[in-house]
Amino acid sequence: MSEEASKAGEAAGTQAGHGTPLPQVDFSTFILSMASSAMVCLGEAPDPASGKSEVNLALAKYNIDLLDMLRNKIMNGLDEAETRLLEGVLYELRLKYVIKAG
């Protein structure tokens, strides 16, 4: 690997020059990131930017629908662990959405 490629890899692995390592890019991390966004919108976790917990059901539904669309599009390409993760995350988020919307 060239020195330039190594530096590019190091830069990609840190958050906008803050030196904070970013998580590995894989399917599970992506699903958990989407789930975290939905949890913030459901008021279940504080917004990382403001530190406040606020409910935004429209955006929560959008994030849940994105996960569902993703599941529908790639179901045949997932391994068992990824399928269980996605199904579990969708179940939990939908349940919390129904409770908040109810």
Image: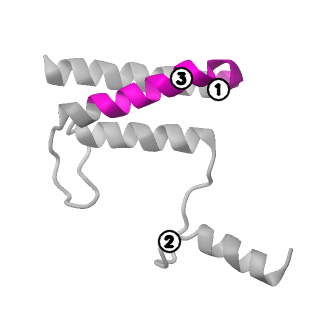
Question: Residue beneath label 1, please?
Answer: 81
- The residue type indicated by label 2 comes to Thr
Q: Residue at x 42, y 30 (%)?
A: 66
Identify the secondary structure beneath mark 3. Answer: helix
- Tell us which disc is closer to us: 1 or 3: 3
Q: CA distance from mark 2 to mark 3?
A: 30 Å
- Judge whether 18 appears above or below 23 on screen: below
Q: Secondary structure at mark 1?
A: helix
Contact, CB < 8 Å: mark 2 with mark 1? Answer: no
Between residue 50 and residue 71, name the one nearer to us: 71
Judged by its main secondary structure, the magenta piece is helix
Where, quadrant-wise, is the N terminus in this rendering?
Answer: bottom right
Q: Which comes before the other along the chain, label 2 or label 1?
A: 2
Residue 48 shows which numbered tag?
A: none
- Look at the numbered discs 2 and 3 and tell me whether their residues touch, using CB distance below 8 Å: no
Q: Amino acid at mark 1?
A: Ala
Say which quadrant the C terminus sits in. top left
Local crowd at mark 2 within 10 Å, few (<14), some, or many (≥20)? few
Q: In terms of secondary structure, where does tag 2 sit?
A: loop
Give the residue displayed 30% in from the left and 38% down from the top: 39
Q: Nearer the viewer, residue 56 or 100?
A: 56
Q: Residue 2 location, x and y as percent?
A: 84, 79
**Residue 2 in the figure: left or right of residue 32:** right
Outermost bottom residue: 3
List the residue tagged with mark 3: 71
Disc 1 and disc 3: Cα gap in Å? 13 Å
Say whether disc 2 or disc 3 marks the residue closer to the N-terminus: 2
Instruction: Tell me the CA gap for discs 2 and 1.
Output: 28 Å
Q: Which residues are magenta?
A: 61-81
According to the image, label 2 marks what residue?
Answer: 20
